[in-house]
Every structure is written in C-alpha cells, then in structure tokens.
Amino acid sequence: MPEGHTIHALADRLERAFRSHRIEAMSPQGRFAADAEHLDGQVLERAQAWGKHLFVEIGAVTLHVHLGLIGQFAVKPLGGMPLPSPVGAVRLRLVGPEHWADLRGPMICTLVDRARQREIISTLGPDPLRRAQRTEAAMARITKSRKGIGELLMDQSVVAGVGNVYRCEVLHRIAVDPFTPGRELDPTTWQQIWQDLVLLMPLGRTFSQIITMPDQVAAASRARRSGRSREITRRLTGERLGDTFERRFLVYKRTGEACPRCGAPVRDTQVSGRTLYWCPACQVRH
C-alpha cells in the first residue's frame, strides 16, 4: 500500500500539471462515468494529501481518492503526442493542456463536498508531511493504549500516512522495541519517532522512494537543500518507484540477515495485518 509520501508526491504532480486549468474527465472503464461528467470541463483548483488520502478540488466538488493496495495514479506529459488509448481498467482519466493522468485500481474513488472532506480529515492523526501539526493528541492516544507502538504507528487516527516500511525502519533507527505498550512510551521517545518521520518522509516525497539508510539520508538531504533534487522530482510520473538511490533498508524484508547495528538476526512477525521486521537484540524496552 502506498505510504503518505507517495500521495503527497501525487498531489504535487497533479498541481503542477493541472492547477488552474480546465480539464477533460472521462471513465474509460465506465465505473466512474456519471461522476466524471460532473468533473468534465471544470477547473482543477487544488490537489492536496492528508496521510494516505488524496483530495482534488475540481469545480464545486472534491475528488476523494485512496489508492489502497494496488491503486496507481500516474501523471504524464503529452509531449506534443496524441493522447494514448487507455490500457487496462482505467477508472478515471484527466486531460489538461499539457498532461494526462490515469487512475487505476483505487480502493476509494468518489466525489465529496467540502464538509465531507473536512469530516474525513478530522478522523486522521497528525501528518508528518504537513506543516504546523499538533502532535499532542497523538501522544495522548498513545499513552492511553495498551497496544504496542509498532501497532499504533499503523493506526491512521494516531499518525496519518505511516505504513509498514516507515514503521519498521524508524523504530529500528531509534532502537525502540515495537512491542512497547503505548502507555509505557515516554514523551521523549515519541518526539524522536515524530522528528524522524518528519526528516524521512519528505525525502520519500521528493525522490519517490523510501530512504532510511543513514548514508542515503545524508545524501538525499544534501540534494534537497541544494535544489539539485528538483529536476529529479519533476521527471517522476508516479508510474514506478524512483531509482536515484539503491533500494536498501535497515530491517525491512531482511529476515534472518544481520542487524546493521548489532549483528543479531533480524526477525519478523505479523502485527496489524502486515509483516513487522525488527531486531530483538538492540530494539529492547528500557
């Protein structure tokens, strides 16, 4: 399932391609045909992400999309070429003056009014990719819970946008036992988790790949600060993962391999319906 950085990057692409432009909207698959008619010929005003939810304001309504496990919403330049025929089950196609975008396989694709949009957002925890987020409510929920922090991080009402890869990698980076009950987690550790998400997730947004290895984080951060990453970001369509950095992780999908910090074997187990990877030797409860 795409994590929050993917949805924020998608909102950025939609804004660059279509904002303030009148769009054509159609449903080649047919399942969204009636709603596509409401969007057709309207001006795309804004695209924004909250956690794993995408909201695209078009005319008087908002397109609400959740990609779920298999959804994809690629945004591509026309490049002076004819619009290609749809391939596969395209739920929604948007066409602007210079770009087109095809939505396939979403879990949610519906039109909502602004009130419903606010209602959905109100159910979500703070988003590490949005500015000026208040994290006190998240900490309050955590400290009242008997669930482990590894499970709580997957709860979108606690933190919006975090998925399995980020939860595994961040908890390892900070050496936190993922089974620590929320009510035993001290505020300092929670702030460390939050700040690491605030550091890492914008890198994912920029490069369209999850970056958690210390050497790669340092290199990606330098590229963002210098502005060298802008051209990379603009070339990415969302059709596939970025490839600026080698795909390497600390513990994610490394069952049985040596922990990079202590050398003990990485383990895995099922938590919140997903495979949690951690090092039981150095991610210990204090």
Image (tube, rainbow, N blue to C red):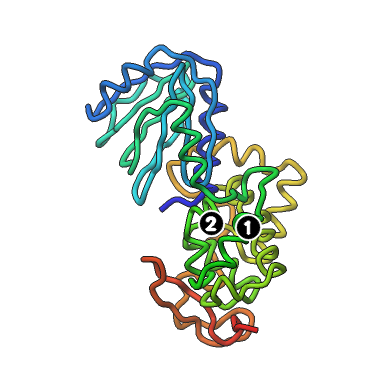
| Vertical side of 227 occupied by 160: above or below | below
Which residue is rendered at x = 55% and y = 67% of the image? 144
Q: Earlier in the sequence, mark 2 or mark 1?
A: 2
The residue type indicated by label 2 comes to Val
The residue type indicated by label 1 comes to Leu
Q: Describe the element under mark 2 as helix, strand or loop.
A: loop
Which residue is rendered at x = 64% and y = 64% of the image? 193
Crowd around label 2: few <14 · some 14–19 · many ≥20 (10 Å): many
Q: Give 7 or 245, whichever is nearer the viewer.
A: 7
Q: Give 180 or 144, whichever is nearer the viewer.
A: 144
- Tag shown at residue 256: none
Q: Is residue 233 left or right of residue 114?
A: right
Q: Quadrant of the C terminus?
A: bottom right
| Vertical side of 198 occupied by 27: above or below | above
Q: Position of residue 92 (x, y in %)?
A: 33, 29
Q: Position of residue 30 (x, y in %)?
A: 22, 27
Q: Give 152 or 30, whichever is nearer the viewer.
A: 152
The residue under label 1 is 197
- The quadrant holding residue 60 is top left
| Vertical side of 31 occupied by 143: above or below | below
Q: Nearer the viewer, mark 2 or mark 1?
A: 2
Q: Position of residue 94 (x, y in %)?
A: 40, 24
The residue under label 2 is 158
- Residue most toward the left? 30
Q: Is residue 223 left or right of residue 271?
A: right
- The quadrant holding residue 38 is top left
Q: Give 126 or 92, whichever is nearer the viewer.
A: 126
Which residue is rendered at x = 50% and y = 53% of the image? 157
Q: Describe the element under mark 1 as helix, strand or loop.
A: helix
